Image (tube, rainbow, N blue to C red):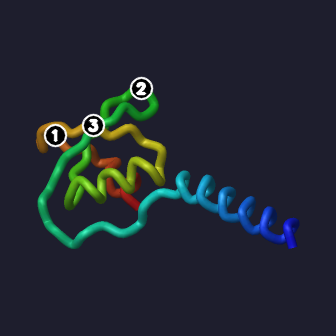
Amino acid sequence: MKFCLVLIGLLLCCGQIFAAYDCPSICPAIYKPVCGQATIKGRPVRCEFSNSCVMGVNACTKGINWQESPCKGLSPLCDALKN
């Protein structure tokens, strides 16, 4: 019985640790455009996202360090980076 309780506790702890590394996947459907800039392969890239949550999810899933920036001079690479 003790073994089962310890095993269940261990599984719950491990599940919480791995859940912390998952990227969020759902954002509110609020259109409040935000632009982000990142350096990719040594070049600055600027993209527009529908809101800051979408930019954050993209940063997490793609491993890109987006920083908010003005929405001018958007990069042609954006479509490929946002998919």
Measure the alpha-carbon separation of dots 3 and 1: 15 Å
Q: State the residue in front, 7 or 74.
A: 7
In the image, 24 versus 6, the foreground residue is 6
Residue sitting at x 66%, y 57%: 13
Q: Are marks 1 and 2 in contact (CB under 8 Å)?
A: no
**CA distance for labels 1 and 2:** 17 Å
Rendered image: mark on residue 67: 3
Image depth: mark 3 or mark 2 in front: 3
Number of residues whose C-alpha sits closer than 10 Å to that of mark 3, classed few (under 14), some (14–19) or many (20 or more): some
- Nearer-N-terminus badge (3/1): 3
Q: Looking at the figure, which quarter contains the N terminus?
A: bottom right
- Give coordinates of residue 63: x percent, y percent: 48, 44
The amino acid marked with disc number 2 is Gly
Question: Which quadrant of the figure contains the C terminus?
Answer: bottom left
Report the amino acid beneath label 1. Answer: Gly
Instruction: Give the residue number, with chain letter if any, for mark 2.
Output: 42
Residue placed under numbered mark 1 in the picture: 73
Q: Indicate which disc, 1 or 2, sits on the residue closer to the N terminus.
A: 2
**Where does residue 25 sit, x and y in percent of width and height?**
41, 66
Relative to 1, 16 lies left or right: left
Is disc 1 surrounded by few (<14), some (14 to 19) or many (20+) residues within 10 Å? few
Q: Position of residue 68 (x, y in %)?
A: 21, 39
Taking depth in this image into account, of 48 and 58 the one nearest to the observer is 58
**Mark 3 element type:** strand
Q: Amino acid at mark 3?
A: Gln
Q: Secondary structure at mark 2?
A: loop
Judge whether 7 appears above or below 48 on screen.
below
Alpha carbon distance from label 3 to label 2? 15 Å
Give me the disc on residue 23: none
Write the residue at 23% across / 56% down.
49
